[in-house]
Image: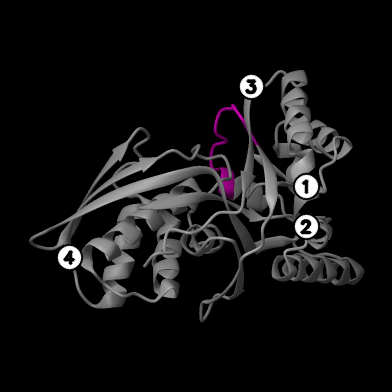
Amino acid sequence: MRAPSTSANLGSGFDVVAVAHDAYFAEAYVKLTSGCGVDIKFRGFDPGGDNTVRRAFQHLFERLGRCWGVEAEVDNRIPIARGLGSSGASAVAALAAFIREAGLRVDPAAVVEAAGLGEAAAAGSPHFDNVAAAALGGAVVIASVKPLELVKFSPRLTFVVGVPDVPPMPEKTKVMRSVLPREVPFRTYVAQLARVSALVAGFARSDPRLVALGMSDEVVEPARAPHVPAYARVRRYALEAGALAVAISGAGPSMIALVEDRDSGAVRAAVERAYAEEGLRAEVKVASTAEGALKDL
């Protein structure tokens, strides 16, 4: 089973919004065995014994009240530690493969919850935005965490995703959260509510112009921008080339630009040029919103 790469936040939607796109994917294969427990093999990058996939299985088994014997192989082709949901997609792909192999019917929210709790292995605490998008596809809003309530939209959106080739930031999630403001003026709070509302309305109406309004952010993004390589140049060049909006993908360092189809080539070239002028190698892709791993289950 495959799970797509994802971009969380999209500007104003910090911790509550994510989109699935077809820039990259993680794939998992599962075989049921006798006994109880999960044996996991990773192709390429190996996150170690305590990983999101293992924890996700543990949480799902607890939720289902039963343990299975599982052999899982994970082929994660999403760049690691780049703000593209690689760890969550691995867990979602593996859980989806297990559910299909076992012939189970499982509430999608239970899968998202298990994978989100498993994210603590990579991020230090549970996170549900990326895994929700990887599981359900399209654009997902986390309406509530306790209890977990998810709202999925299926907009048709086109993006340009820029992935710089830079060394991983040590304790990236911790650092990128530590720089966030602890409080904001009331007028900023109201403006941010308007932006998030525009983001959700844009998803519901599949309206890139509304989504672009929602991708503007004056709370999280300004605090994180100094820690994202080439942020200012990439953003400026992309907008000058016709991008509707530009944001940090998750906690970075990747960036995501919302574009009209007709402008995707020009924006991609502009982002490539921006990274090159900063002396950075980067992979830049045109991507569209994608289906989630649970679409056929």
Q: Secondary structure at mark 3?
A: loop
Using the numbered discs, state the Cα–Cα distance from disc 3 to disc 2 in whole angstroms: 29 Å
Amino acid type at mark 1: Glu
Could you tell which of marks 1 and 3 lies nearer the N-terminus?
1
Residue 165 visible at all: yes
Q: Nearer the viewer, mark 4 or mark 2?
A: 2
Q: Which residue is mark 4?
A: 68
Amino acid type at mark 2: Pro
Q: Is residue 292 magenta?
A: no
- Is there CB contact under 8 Å for labels 4 and 3? no
- Residue 71: x and y, percent? 19, 51
Q: Nearer the viewer, mark 4 or mark 1?
A: 1
Q: Is residue 167 magenta?
A: yes
Residue at (79% x, 32% y) in the render:
266
- Residue 203: x and y, percent? 70, 66
Farthest-out residue, left: 34
Q: Secondary structure at mark 4?
A: loop
Using the numbered discs, state the Cα–Cα distance from disc 4 to disc 1 in whole angstroms: 46 Å
Determine the image quadrant of residue 262. top right
Could you tell which of marks 4 and 1 lies nearer the N-terminus?
4
Q: Which residue is mark 2?
A: 208
Q: Is residue 193 above or below residue 211?
A: below
Could you tell which of marks 4 and 2 lies nearer the N-terminus?
4
Could you tell which of marks 4 and 3 lies nearer the N-terminus?
4
Amino acid type at mark 3: Arg
Farthest-out residue, bottom: 147
Using the numbered discs, state the Cα–Cα distance from disc 2 to disc 1 in whole angstroms: 8 Å
Residue range of the region highlighted in magenta in the rendering? 162-173
Q: Which residue is mark 1?
A: 260
- Residue 258: x and y, percent? 75, 48
Could you tell which of marks 3 and 2 lies nearer the N-terminus?
2
